[in-house]
Image: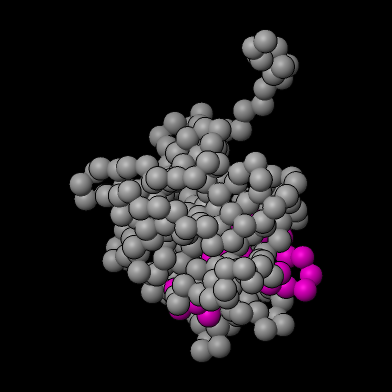
Amino acid sequence: MAALQGYPDQHIWIYNLQSGTGARMRSLPGSEGNPVWATDVRSVYYALQTAEGSRVVRQSAESGSLPEVLYSSSE
Amino acid sequence: MTPDDAQLVLTQVGKTFGDPNGSTLMRLDLSAPPAARKLEPLFSQNEGANVARLSPNGRSLIVGRSGNIYACRYPPAGDSLRLVAALAGPAWPFFSRDGQLLYVVSRQALYAHAVEASSDGRIRVGERSQLFRILHPARADANLGAASRDGKRILAIATDDTEETLLQVLTDWTTLLRP
C-alpha cells in the first residue's frame, strides 16, 4: 500500500499489509502527492511539488530505489 | 494510468486548492521521449475535476466533480463527459479490480454501482447501493478508498471519531502565530 504522510510536506510511505511494516520512499526535495501504482505493481507514479514547479515521478517500490523524474513543469 | 503504463491522466490544479472548476484534466504521454513530453488537455473545453480514474482495461474514464460523477470513453476521441451519477455531497469514485463495479465514497458511506461497459468504453452505471458506513476524516481529500488486487477487500481512510469528520474554522488565527 502506498500512503501519504507528513505535514506540511507530504511523503510517500510503502506498507506491507501482511507484515505490517512500512518505510518512507527515498525522495527528492518537495511535497509528494497522488501516488498511483504501475500496472505491474512494482513502481509508483506520483506528483512532486517543489519551489521550482511540478514534477511527475516514477519510483520503484523496492527499498532504496531512486526516483526518476518523467516530466517537469516550471511555474 | 493506462494498463500499458504509456499514459497518465491527471488533474492540473489551479490557483484555488480544491476548486474543481480551477483544475484541468490532462494527459501525459510517457511513451514520448522525455524532452518531448508535455501535458495535453483531454478536452477542448475545460472540464474541471476533483478526481479522475481510468477503468482497469483503460477504455473508460470516470471523473468526480463535487457530487457528480461523469464518464466517457478513453481516449475521449471528441466525446464530452456525460453525467452518470449524482450524489448529495462530494464523491470519490474508484473501480473494482474487474471494472464491473464502481465504488463511491460519499457522505460518510461506501456505495457501489454496477457498471455496464460496451466494447468501445462507453459505460452506464446501475442503481446505487450502500455497502458500508464510513466516517472519513475531513482532512483526507483524495484516494479515500481502493480495492485490493484480489478484489475481496477495500481499503478506506476512516475514523471512529466524529469530531474528525467536521471542518473546523479558526477565527483570529493570526493570534496563534509565533513571532
Magenta stretch prevailing secondary structure? loop
Residue at image coords 62%, 28%? B168
Residue at image coords 39%, 46%? A25
The magenta segment: B41-63
Q: Position of residue B37 (x, y in %)?
A: 62, 69
Depth check: A7 or B86 in front? A7
Q: Position of residue B100 (x, y in %)?
A: 43, 75
A6, above or below B170, in the image: below
Residue B19 as seen in the image, left or right of residue B3: right
Residue B94 as seen in the image, left or right of residue B88: left
* Residue furthest out toward the bottom: B119
Depth check: B82 or B132 in front? B82
Q: Position of residue B19 (x, y in %)?
A: 72, 49
Q: Is residue B52 magenta?
A: yes
Depth check: B93 or A13 in front? A13
Residue at image coords 65%, 41%? A51
B86, above or below A25, in the image: below
Colour convention: one colour
Residue at image coords 44%, 70%? B101
B96, above or below B21, in the image: below
A16, above or below B36, in the image: above
Residue A25 in view in this figure:
yes
Residue B66 in view in this figure:
no
- Which quadrant holds the C terminus of chain B? top right
Q: Is residue B107 magenta?
A: no
